Image: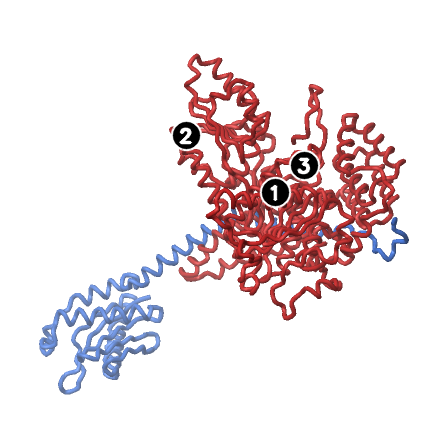
């Protein structure tokens, strides 16, 4: 699973979409394809960002790419992440949350007009770091620990139940007992007995 | 011990145990410093039900020994003896003291304290005087009498009561019983009505009524009020119904007693029965460390395990009163259910679910262990009940109880003697034969006597004479057979018995309803009540229309049958000083009545099961609490009257 690009957009006073920062990782594509792919991704990202209303999160599929977009409602800031189909959705959105939050902290809204002077090297760092979704995601980490714990617990329970005499054995033995035992001898019905000693 | 007080019974039986604990700690605290406790072997069982070892340790007990002959080796100088007032124990104590005096020049180093249970006797003190040690010992009493086994079962744990009462003419146990019942009255209020049957039972009733007057004289300020929940005390003399204990018990707990022998709610079995040896052993619940153990030897071929049989084992509670024929099926059902519960672990996906499962796991594991134990025990019993000997004996019993083919049964018993079946089994059947027929014909009597002496030895002559004195093995007199009338009138034989869903108490013997319990049914309900049989007209007349709480009916309508049974019949009313007979609450039926039943001379597990069955039928209206001098079975009963010859050739009384 791979992230192909991270990009941040904003809408200017003319309602035009401006790209504030973007990074790409196209190492999985052949050398000659890369420029074409980058162009495609740029177009996709821009389109998605334009069409997303504030406060919305979306997932867009454009074979073989998947785009996740988050447009913040309070500030006209939109983040787009283009990944392959495998990359987990939840991680993508949490990555978007993170980069937008940190972008805001680093570059308050006033600075955005100077679009060419924005240098956001952290974006590249994040792009490479979050190629492994587990890095991005606390939740995934915890989930993995949980799964591991569950496995250990299950194994412990199994071994606990193995100790001592098996229940199957007891089931068989008690069945034997119930088959063998018949009602205790009952004396012949009085109607059949001919005489009783008085 | 924590299994008491779990059922919502009206009578607080746990308070009795707590009282006994308090008294025990008082006894222990009366001696300062570290002490060594010496117990008679028969009392250690009941004591372990009252107090666990940690409690004893808290009060300074460092070591414990059994009271037996031979020198007492101990470093501790403070000795506390707790034992029943029996002569041979006095001899052992005198021996111990003599030994210490010989060893140490300063015999005053040792401090001897002796606490009799439940009371001191003059004769024991005389023996100590004659041995010259009376001055060395500080004597006290530990008033332990009724020990609660379950919320509905109390026992005095006195041995050999039947023999003492009817063979030796020793009425000490009646006195102990009276004091125990008096203590109950002080706690729970006067018994409004005391009803019973049997000569010794009448003695007990008279003693009880007299004691109440004595208490009033001693302490005029304390007036006993009428009990709020107990509506009557029914005293049954063992001699009234000897037939029931002679029959082989067919309930699960009854058969455990017949096959293994239950002492003070514990049974000892081979450890292989209850689990593979690789298993961590289930901790034995006995608290008395066997320093002079007779069961475990240095290299044991099969180690023994002591198992507690009480209501702390939920599985046992389900099984104990059932007819054994259905136990296998129940075990099987439960095994499958536990298996299903174990399988639920595959459904546990989330952590929360896994945690829930693990919480349940502990309970399942202990159920599993309990299942293992009881499957093992049931298999052992099964092995015994499928033998032809067992079935033959059962056939003879059932035919005798029903009065069918008497002559044929004679032949069967003769055959058993020829095959050298254990003598207790043979004697049980012969006594049964004698009791249901009013004795044996002259020729048969002489014949069997000869056969027994020749096959089993001449030492049994005394045993047979004892049985004759007890009217258990006699020649037929001129009187007609009384038992036939009783059998018919009280419907002792019930043909249709459904072991799965019993309709009547006769399921405990697969067709014979215990006579003693039928008598209780007469007193409380007016007559035997197997479902499907018409209840006697008297009962209908006495019952309150609309299903209100029924009062005690008494012996009305059954006087004829009672005349056929040995011993006096009585029915007394105890009035409170202001003339009130019954508490208002009981009359208004606001809470279930408790009927206390006292078996003088012992009762069997089947009788207990039958009474519990009655309690189920009367649920919400009447509860039953059973008290007894001890729990017996046919073997222990006959053992107590058997003449024993030890290897020195001196005959010993039947102290088993």
Secondary structure at badge 2 equals: loop
Query: Given the image, what chain letter belongs to the residue carrying mark 1?
Result: B
Query: Given the image, what chain letter belongs to the residue carrying mark 3?
Result: B
Q: Nearer the viewer, mark 2 or mark 1?
A: 1
Secondary structure at badge 3 equals: helix
Q: Residue at x 54, y 43 (%)?
A: B214
Front in this rendered view, residue B439 or A84: B439
In the rendered structure, find residue B237 and report the number of the disc placed on it. Answer: none
Front in this rendered view, residue B149 or B389: B149
In the rendered structure, find residue B207 and report the number of the disc placed on it. Answer: 1
Separation (CA) of disc 3 from disc 1: 15 Å
Residue B280 visible in the shown view: no
Q: Tell me residue A8's x, y (percent).
A: 20, 75
Nearer the N terminus, badge 2 or badge 3? 2
Question: Which picture quadrant has residue A189?
Answer: bottom right
Determine whether B329 is above or below B155 in the image.
below
Nearer the N terminus, badge 2 or badge 1? 2
Q: Tell me residue B282's x, y (percent).
A: 52, 41
Front in this rendered view, residue B394 or B111: B111
Q: Residue at x 49, y 59 (%)?
A: B346
Residue A54 visible in the shown view: yes
The crowding category of the residue bearing disc 1, from other C-alpha atoms within 10 Å (few below 14, some 14 to 19, many at least 20), is some
Q: Nearer the viewer, mark 3 or mark 1?
A: 1
Q: Colour of chain B?
A: red
Q: Residue at x 86, y 58 (%)?
A: A191
Question: Which picture quadrant has residue B179?
Answer: top right
Reading the image, the residue beneath label 3 is: B165
């Amino acid at each position: 699973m791979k992230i192909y690009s991270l990009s941040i957009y904003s809408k200017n006073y003319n309602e035009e979409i401006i790209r504030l920062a973007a990074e790409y990782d196209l190492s999985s594509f052949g050398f000659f394809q890369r420029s074409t792919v980058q162009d495609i991704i740029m177009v996709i990202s821009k389109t998605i960002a334009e069409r997303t209303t504030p406060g919305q999160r979306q997932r867009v599929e454009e074979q073989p790419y998947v785009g996740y977009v988050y447009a913040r409602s309070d500030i006209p800031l939109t983040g787009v992440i283009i990944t392959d189909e495998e990359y987990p959705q939840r991680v993508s959105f949490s990555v978007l949350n993170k980069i937008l939050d940190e972008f805001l902290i680093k570059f308050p809204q006033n600075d955005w007009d100077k679009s060419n002077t924005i240098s956001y090297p952290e974006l590249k760092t994040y792009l490479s770091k979050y190629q492994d979704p587990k890095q991005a995601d606390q939740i995934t980490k915890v989930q993995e620990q949980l799964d591991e714990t569950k496995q250990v617990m299950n194994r412990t329970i199994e071994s606990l139940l193995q100790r001592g005499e098996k229940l199957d054995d007891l089931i068989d033995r008690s069945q034997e007992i119930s088959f063998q035992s018949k009602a205790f001898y009952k004396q012949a019905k009085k109607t059949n007995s001919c005489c009783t000693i008085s | 011990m924590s299994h008491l007080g779990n059922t919502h019974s009206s009578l607080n039986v746990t308070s009795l145990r707590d009282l006994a604990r308090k008294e025990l700690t008082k006894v222990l605290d009366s001696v300062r410093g570290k002490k060594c406790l010496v117990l008679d072997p028969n009392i250690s069982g009941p004591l372990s039900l009252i107090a666990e070892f940690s409690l004893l340790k808290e009060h300074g007990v460092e070591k414990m020994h059994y009271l037996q002959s031979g020198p007492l080796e101990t470093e501790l100088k403070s000795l506390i003896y707790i034992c029943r007032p029996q002569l041979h124990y006095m001899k052992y104590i005198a021996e111990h003291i003599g030994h210490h005096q010989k060893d140490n020049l300063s015999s005053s180093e040792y401090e001897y304290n002796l606490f009799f249970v439940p009371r001191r006797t003059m004769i024991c003190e005389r023996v100590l005087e004659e041995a010259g040690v009376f001055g060395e010992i500080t004597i006290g009493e530990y008033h332990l009498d009724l020990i609660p086994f379950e919320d509905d079962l109390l026992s005095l744990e006195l041995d050999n009561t039947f023999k003492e009462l009817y063979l030796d003419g020793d009425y000490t146990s009646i006195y102990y019983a009276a004091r125990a019942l008096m203590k109950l009255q002080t706690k729970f209020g006067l018994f409004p009505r005391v009803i019973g049957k049997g000569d010794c039972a009448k003695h007990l009733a008279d003693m009880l009524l007299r004691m109440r007057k004595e208490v009033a004289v001693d302490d005029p300020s304390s007036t006993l009020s009428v009990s709020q929940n107990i509506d009557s005390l029914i005293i049954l003399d063992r001699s009234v119904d000897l037939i029931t204990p002679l029959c082989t018990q067919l309930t699960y707990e009854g058969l455990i007693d017949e096959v293994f022998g239950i002492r003070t709610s514990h049974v000892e079995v081979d450890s292989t029965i209850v689990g593979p040896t690789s298993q961590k052993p289930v901790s034995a619940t006995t608290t008395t460390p066997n320093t002079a153990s007779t069961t475990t030897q240095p290299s044991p071929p099969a180690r023994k395990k002591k198992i507690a049989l009480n209501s702390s084992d939920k599985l046992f509670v389900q099984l104990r009163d059932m007819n054994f024929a259905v136990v296998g099926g129940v075990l099987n059902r439960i095994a499958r259910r536990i298996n299903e519960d174990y399988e639920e672990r595959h459904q546990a996906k989330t952590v929360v679910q896994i945690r829930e499962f693990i919480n349940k796991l502990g309970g399942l594991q202990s159920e599993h262990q309990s299942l293992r134990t009881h499957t093992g025990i049931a298999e052992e019993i099964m092995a015994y009940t499928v033998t032809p000997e067992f079935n033959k004996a059962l056939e003879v019993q059932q035919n005798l109880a029903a009065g069918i083919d008497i002559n044929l049964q004679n032949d069967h018993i003769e055959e058993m003697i020829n095959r050298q079946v254990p003598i207790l089994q043979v004697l049980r059947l012969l006594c049964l034969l004698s009791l249901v027929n009013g004795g044996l014909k002259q020729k048969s009597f002489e014949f069997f006597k000869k056969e027994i002496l020749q096959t089993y030895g001449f030492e049994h002559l005394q045993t047979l004479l004892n049985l004759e004195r007890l009217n258990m093995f006699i020649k037929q007199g001129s009187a007609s057979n009384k038992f036939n009338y009783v059998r018919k009138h009280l419907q002792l034989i019930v043909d249709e018995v459904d072991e799965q869903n019993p309709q009547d108490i006769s399921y405990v013997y697969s067709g014979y309803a215990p006579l003693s319990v039928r008598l209780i049914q007469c007193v409380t309900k007016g007559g035997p009540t197997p479902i499907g049989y018409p209840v006697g007209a008297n009962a209908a007349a006495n019952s309150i229309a609309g299903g209100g709480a029924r009062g005690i009916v008494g012996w009305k309508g059954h006087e004829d049958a009672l005349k056929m049974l040995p011993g006096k019949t009585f029915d007394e009313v105890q009035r409170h000083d202001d003339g009130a007979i019954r508490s208002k609450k009981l009359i208004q039926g606001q809470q279930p009545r408790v009927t206390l039943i006292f078996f003088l001379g012992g009762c069997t597990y089947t009788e207990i099961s039958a009474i519990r069955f009655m309690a189920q039928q009367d649920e919400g209206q009447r509860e039953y609490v059973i008290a007894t001098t001890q729990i017996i079975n046919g073997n222990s009963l006959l053992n107590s009257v058997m003449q024993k010859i030890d290897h020195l050739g001196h005959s010993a009384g039947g102290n088993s």
